[in-house]
Image (cartoon, grey):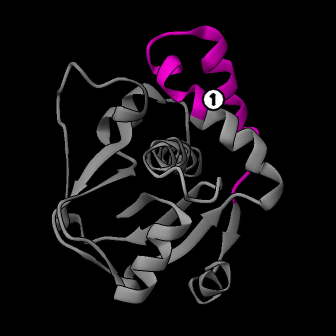
Amino acid sequence: MRVYLASTLPLLAAVHAAREAGPAPLAGHAVTPALREWYAGGDLEELEYAALTAAARASLRLLAADPSAPRRRVVLAAEIPDASVRWARGDAAIDGDDRSLVEITAPVPWKRLASGHVDDDGAAADIAAAVEALPAAEAGDDDALFTVDGAEGHELLWYATQELQHLL
């Protein structure tokens, strides 16, 4: 199963050094039954893009928790055995990004990473504004939500795993 892990550049450096993401359990985003139901008209590529976007939003939360991290969202795509992934089935509380939320029950070895997705340096100002607006957006402020959604206007750049070390 393809799972998207929210990260930051400092966390990516730690994953690179340890050669794994962990310890478990880890939060991730994937194409879940709840996401399929919500986005019924989407094909697999669109559903995976929705899961990647949810992981990018989760990266904003990680950036908010680390004021020293460069203001660039990072998402790691990994191929995880289905047996190591759990999701909330039939949970009425699922909404927004939670539709794709999964729990990975084991550390993710570096060799399971398929790619990295990272903001360009030019997105830093908009990402910083989104990080600042995040608490108000999650509290329902429409102006703050507009700012956070503006971060999604920046497409994440794709990197092969062997290229990720050059970002550190």
Residue at image mark 1: 148
Q: Is residue 154 visible?
A: no
> In the image, residue 103 lies at what x, y percent?
22, 53
Viewer-nearest residue: 7 or 3:
7
Give the side of residue 107 with respect to residue 99, left or right. Answer: left
Residue 146 in which image quadrant: top right
What residue do we see at 30% from left, 39% from top?
Answer: 33
Residue 136 to residue 73: above or below: above
Viewer-nearest residue: 99 or 27:
27
Residue 110 to residue 102: above or below: below
> In the image, residue 25 lies at what x, y percent?
17, 60
Local SS, label 1:
helix
> In the image, residue 52 lies at what x, y percent?
53, 50
What residue do we see at 59% from left, 44% from top?
Answer: 46
Prevalent SS, magenta region: helix
Give the side of residue 43 with respect to residue 150, left or right. Answer: left
Q: Which residues are magenta?
A: 132-156
